[in-house]
Image (cartoon, helix red, strand yellow):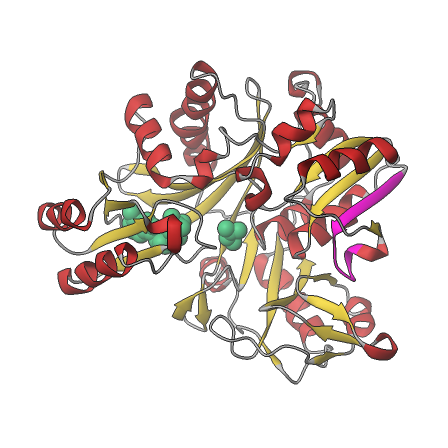
């Protein structure tokens, strides 16, 4: 089968790497891909906003499955256009992708289906939002309703901070995404992520992970897309995982189907593990980046078979996916200045040496420059990923590989996995 993979980050390199291991794959195309993805795929320049053009490409190249990595084309309805053209697609349509694309949509669904989550108010004007702040008090959380590249959330420890955040959002700090905001009760606890495939009816649990959102060691500095991750997250015990499925994932899948917008793809639940049990912080309608990298590093089953069964509503007839018992950990190498102003063009050497040290290096933001030299082209540049008998061992293997990479314009956190390594003692 020929597969078209949409996206260009470390998540897509990890997916391409795993798809390429399947005997079911004939030819992989990727749009736009990156130099790491190119080791497994033919890169094609498609305008993802031109749905008819993507459909025409799929017809011409006899594509049997389209795998959509990032959220933007999902929220934009690319999956619907491809399905209307007769193609199998891994990833939800526009309506189902609202689970990620509109925070207010998801909160309303949680309220209807009695899914544990923070108390909230949707506000369409600054006055409504300020009234909600008075009700909730501080600390409090303010979220732009729409997609804001992971930046539209302010956790305010004081009311003045919260008031300023509301005013900024209604002043257009996040464009249309902030035309409506959600004001939320502050939850405390440890965060974990849980991933499950669903075809709208059957739920196939995948695995858990934890990421590190702050840019600096010790979880300091501004939020990022994620500076590293590991899987599994053992704080999500089998009992808490079962609760997550029965109280959060299953009622979501049922409510979406009942409402005529069945969700097909991977549901990524961001959870707060509170004293009252797991509560939903947010959904994403796609694999996490860099969480996908650690999931793929542990996945032992055939990824083509899994994603195709999901796309074709046949998850009830496949074997449950197998994951290595060994944890995996990934360290993000970012360009200096990330997240505010990442330096572009920094030269990268030593990937082969890093992989010889036992890790897998996924490309997240790289490009091939003059004379084939690899250079940085994004904020997050490489994801150095390894497995080990413990999180500590996986961490040591990943950092040994990081140290083999020569990237003078880059940096990384040195403490990825610290919570779990501490627990391992
Ligand atoms: P989100 O984009 O919704 O995942 O939010 C980004 C981050 O903000 C989360 O990973 C949490 O660390 C934090 N956060 C979001 N909602 C809440 C909440 N209700 N209580 C406490 N922290 C939150
Ligand atoms: N690592 C967070 C995300 O993919 O949204």
Q: Where is residue 419 in the image (x, y as percent from the top left)?
A: 44, 60
**Camera-side residue: 142 or 273?**
142
**Camera-side residue: 10 or 248?**
10
Magenta highlight on residue 331:
no
Residue at 47% over, 45% down = 193
Asked which quadrant contains residue 365, the reply is bottom right
Q: Relative to 176, say whether 204 is above or below.
A: above
Q: Can residue 158 be seen in this view?
A: yes
Magenta highlight on residue 31:
yes
Lateral position of residue 132 relative to residue 36, left or right: left
Asked which quadrant contains residue 150, the reply is bottom left
Q: Is residue 210 visible?
A: no
Q: Where is residue 326 in the image (x, y as percent from the top left)?
A: 65, 49
Give the magenta-colored segment's residue range. 27-37
Task: Classify the position of the N terminus by image quarter.
Answer: top right
Q: Relative to 396, say whether 163 is above or below.
A: above
Q: Position of residue 203 (x, y in %)?
A: 56, 24
Q: Where is residue 330 in the image (x, y as percent from the top left)?
A: 62, 60
Asked which quadrant contains residue 123, the reply is top left
Residue at 72% over, 26% down = 88
Lateral position of residue 296 relative to residue 141, left or right: right
Residue at 59% over, 79% down = 343
**Image mark count:** 0
**Camera-side residue: 32 or 57?**
57
């Amino acid at each position: 089968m020929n597969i078209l993979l949409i996206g260009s980050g470390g998540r897509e390199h990890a997916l391409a790497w795993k798809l390429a291991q399947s005997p079911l794959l004939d030819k992989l195309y990727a749009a736009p891909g990156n130099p790491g993805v190119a080791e497994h795929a033919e890169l094609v320049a498609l305008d993802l906003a031109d749905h008819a053009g993507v459909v025409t490409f799929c017809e011409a190249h006899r594509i049997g499955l389209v795998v959509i990595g990032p959220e933007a084309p999902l929220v934009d309805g690319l999956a619907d256009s491809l399905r209307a053209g007769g193609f199998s697609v891994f990833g939800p349509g526009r309506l189902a992708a609202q689970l990620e694309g509109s925070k207010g949509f998801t909160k309303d669904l949680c309220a209807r289906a009695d899914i544990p989550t923070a108390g909230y108010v949707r506000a369409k004007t600054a006055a409504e939002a300020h009234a909600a702040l008075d009700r909730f008090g501080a600390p409090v959380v303010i979220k732009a309703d729409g997609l804001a590249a992971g930046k539209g959330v302010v956790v305010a420890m004081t009311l003045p901070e919260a008031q300023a955040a509301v005013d900024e959002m209604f002043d257009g700090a996040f464009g249309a995404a902030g035309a409506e905001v959600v004001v939320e009760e502050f939850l405390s606890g440890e965060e974990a992520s849980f991933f499950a495939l669903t075809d709208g009816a059957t739920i196939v649990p995948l695995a858990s992970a934890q990421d590190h959102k702050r840019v600096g060691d010790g979880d300091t500095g501004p939020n990022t897309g994620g500076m590293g991750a590991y899987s599994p997250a053992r704080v999500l015990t089998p009992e808490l995982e079962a609760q997550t499925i029965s109280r959060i994932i299953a009622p979501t899948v049922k409510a979406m189907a009942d409402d005529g917008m069945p969700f097909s793809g991977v549901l990524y639940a961001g959870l707060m593990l509170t004293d009252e049990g797991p509560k939903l912080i947010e959904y994403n309608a796609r694999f996490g980046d860099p969480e996908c990298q650690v999931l793929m590093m542990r996945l032992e089953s055939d990824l083509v078979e899994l994603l195709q069964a999901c796309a074709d509503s046949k998850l009830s007839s496949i074997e449950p996916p197998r994951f290595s018992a060994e944890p995996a950990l990934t360290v993000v190498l970012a360009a200096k200045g990330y997240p505010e102003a990442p330096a572009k063009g920094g030269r990268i050497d030593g990937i082969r040496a890093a992989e010889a040290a036992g890790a897998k290096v996924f490309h997240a933001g790289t490009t091939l420059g003059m004379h084939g030299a690899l250079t940085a082209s994004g904020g997050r540049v490489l994801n150095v990923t390894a497995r080990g008998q413990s999180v500590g061992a996986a961490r040591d293997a990943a950092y040994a590989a990081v140290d083999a990479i020569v990237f003078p314009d880059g940096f990384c956190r040195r403490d990825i996995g610290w919570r779990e390594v501490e627990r391992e003692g």
